[in-house]
């Protein structure tokens, strides 16, 4: 019986690995988009202090965490 359950457990663990690694990549992409957008805006508007980089980087972190929590708590 254990041999029949083992492939299911492996399949479930691979499924979980794919789900959580995808979520991590999405978080990284959201944060990177915030930083790069802020850096671009600071360059276009020629600010001495990188205010848009800081604001959009923090917004990207909060948006990524919100997205992660929302997706993590989603019912299976």
Image (spheres, rainbow, N blue to C red):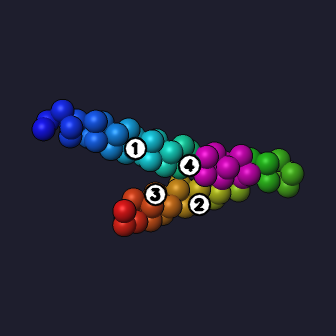
- Tell whether position 39 is magenta: no
Residue marked by disc 3: 68
Query: Residue 74's quadrant in the figure?
Result: bottom left
Residue marked by disc 1: 15
Q: Mark 1 touching mark 4, by CB under 8 A?
A: no
Residue beneath the point at 61% across and 46% down: 29
Q: Is residue 36 visible?
A: yes
Residue 15 relative to residue 6: left or right: right
Q: Mark 3 touching mark 4, by CB under 8 A?
A: yes
Indicate the position of residue 16 as horizontal and vertical percent values: 37, 45
- Distance (Cα) linking label 2 and label 1: 30 Å
Rendered image: mark on residue 47: none
Local crowd size for mark 1, using a 10 Å CA cut-off: few (<14), some (14–19), many (≥20): few
Q: Secondary structure at mark 4?
A: helix
Residue marked by disc 4: 26
Residue marked by disc 2: 59
- Tell whether position 36 is magenta: yes
Mark 2 or mark 1, which has the lower sequence index? Answer: 1
Indicate the position of residue 55 as horizontal and vertical percent values: 63, 59
The magenta-colored residue range is 29-38
Q: Mark 2 touching mark 1, by CB under 8 A?
A: no
Q: Report the front residue among 61 and 10.
A: 10
Indicate the position of residue 21 as horizontal and vertical percent values: 46, 41
Q: Secondary structure at mark 1?
A: helix
Mark 3 or mark 4, which has the lower sequence index? Answer: 4
């Amino acid at each position: 019986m254990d041999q029949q359950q083992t492939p299911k457990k492996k399949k479930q663990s691979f499924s979980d690995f794919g789900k959580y690694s995808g979520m991590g990549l999405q978080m990284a992409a959201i944060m990177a988009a915030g930083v790069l957008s802020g850096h671009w805006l600071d360059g276009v508007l020629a600010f001495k202090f990188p205010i848009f980089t800081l604001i959009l980087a923090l917004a990207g972190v909060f948006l990524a965490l919100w997205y992660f929590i929302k997706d993590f708590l989603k019912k299976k």
